[in-house]
Image (cartoon, rainbow, N blue to C red):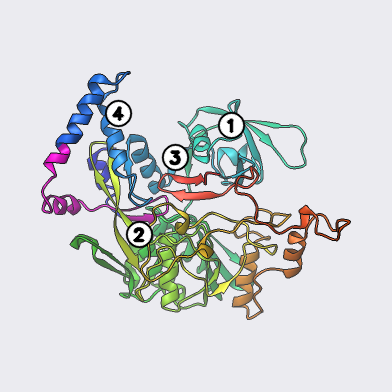
Amino acid sequence: MSTRRLGGLSLILVGALGGVLVSLGITAAAQRGDPLPLKELQQFANVFAAIKSSYVEPVTDEKLVNDAIKGLFNDLDPHSTYLDAEAFKEMEAVTQGGFGGLGIEIGSEDGMPKVISPIEDTPAARAGILAGDLITHIDGKPTKGMTLSEAIKLMRGEPKTPIVLTIKRQDNDKPVVVHIVRDLIKVRSVRSKMLDDNIAYVRIAQFQERTVEDLGRQLSELGSKGVPKALILDLRNDPGGLLDGAIGVSSAFLKPDVLVVSTKGRIPSSNREFFSKQAGYMQNFLGSEDGPDASKVAAWARTVPMVVLVNVGSASASEIVAGALQDYERAKIIGSRTFGKGSVQSVLPLSEDTGIKLTTALYYTPKGRSIQVTGVEPDIEVDDTAQGSLFRLPREVDLQRHLLNSNFEETDEDQPKEDERKEQPKMFEFGGADDYQLKQAINFLEGRPVKKNDPSLVAKADKPVAQAEAKDGSTPDAEKKSPVNRADPNVQRFRITPDGVVPVPQ
């Protein structure tokens, strides 16, 4: 991607997959700072020359330089990284919402990729891929032990190219072989529908370039037949994205000209405040004067009772929106504590198609709260399912070298706990009939009691398999409540990194 094309990406991103503030002023600020350490740079040049001339195998200049640059980031926070050509291209694809692939969201189980959900109207959905399918082979290559990133790279590719997946499906003894032709996948950022009793439901999967435009259209359609009784904004498993999108989304539900988020860093250009936009700003996204009336959209979206759904997968831009709506008491936050990524990164181009992503600031909610490490605490805690929590992605606090929050003391209790339950809750569709948190949000808006989970189902899931006592009266091993060994091959955890979602080493 050329520097000129990067100009088209001159936006602020704060997603867990790559929170970025493009600020070329940083380069100038760095040049005005301390002089370059010439002695140390000469030492680097000597090492470079020694490796190039004497290493047992030839090494190209490009590889040596790239590896040296990567090494500079080894001890920085986990969101600062070197962007080679492939990573640069990937960032552009994620930001713009399009890439060549199959159209599935995947996790991992038993060391293999597992389909969380096929994206509607994509090659995977049309080929019959189902939620819960285990991908055992990709083009004949076993996936057992393969990292999630490796599996994603194998499944992505140029549109119109074929791929063969071998699937292990529940209640099916024989493997299922599926032939798919890749296509350009355009991730739909915003979805909506009207629930029973005139409650509007809006889900934002990721903050992209078109998110505010898509949100405006969805809100307009929802209000076209009358003002909804209430609104549910679903930000669960939304890893973030463009800060500009977060500001626009917040503006749809807040009064104009109120502080949404502020950023603070070492250099002046990192210290900024971002305010909600005027009521008419959405008209820019809704098209011509003959299109939907933005003022009518703003009128009901800023006043009806509102709930925001969040979970551990809600990160960065999602947390900015949730934090702002919570600070102004515009909405009740329901779900589980969010990821806790409160930092901002800046993309600085190095060449036509490479750059660096550098953490340059922390962001703060309107009340001055930093959600770094802590995340956004829900007003009402509700588990993912009636059987208990389902998503166990580690949070920011679990990432190595994460930035600390001076207002929060970390303890061992903040580390993820191993799950001892015998039966794992089943995957569900966000916004579907089996969405437990959504049901509780509706209960809240309808004035009915809200439950964290179903105690009877949780007890059943936690119930040990073995009930009999040993002859000596002791508890059998199957009943002992000792922590699950982290080396257990059936226990797989994930970590959200600048390169995506990757498994935690066992």
Residue highlighted by disc 2: 343
- Disc 2 crowd rating (10 Å Cα; few below 14, some 14-19, many 20+) is many
Residue highlighted by disc 1: 180
Tell me, yes or no, whether the highlighted magenta stretch contains residue 16.
yes
Q: Disc 2 versus disc 4: distance between alpha carbons?
A: 30 Å
- Is the Cβ of the residue at disc 1 closer than 8 Å to that at disc 3? no
Single out the mark in the foreground, 3 or 2.
Answer: 2
Q: Give the mark, 2 or 4, whose residue is nearer the N terminus.
A: 4
Which mark is drawn over residue 99? 3
Q: Nearest the camera: 103 or 83?
A: 83
Quarter of the picture containing the N terminus is: top left
**Is residue 478 shown left or right of residue 442?**
right
Q: Is residue 368 above or below residue 185?
A: below
Q: Secondary structure at mark 3?
A: strand
Q: Secondary structure at mark 4?
A: helix
Give coordinates of residue 141: x percent, y percent. Answer: 58, 27
Residue highlighted by disc 4: 63
Q: Give the mark, 4 or 1, whose residue is nearer the N terminus.
A: 4
Q: Which amino acid lies under the numbered mark 4 shown in the image of this protein?
A: Lys
Q: In the current view of this chain or complex, which residue is farthest to the bottom?
A: 447
- Disc 1 crowd rating (10 Å Cα; few below 14, some 14-19, many 20+) is many
Q: Disc 1 versus disc 3: distance between alpha carbons?
A: 16 Å
Q: Is residue 472 above or below residue 27?
A: below
State the image quarter where residue 488 is shown.
top right
Q: Nearest the camera: 364 or 396?
A: 396
Q: In the current view of this chain or complex, which residue is farthest to the right?
A: 471
**Residue located at (10% from left, 48% from top):** 35
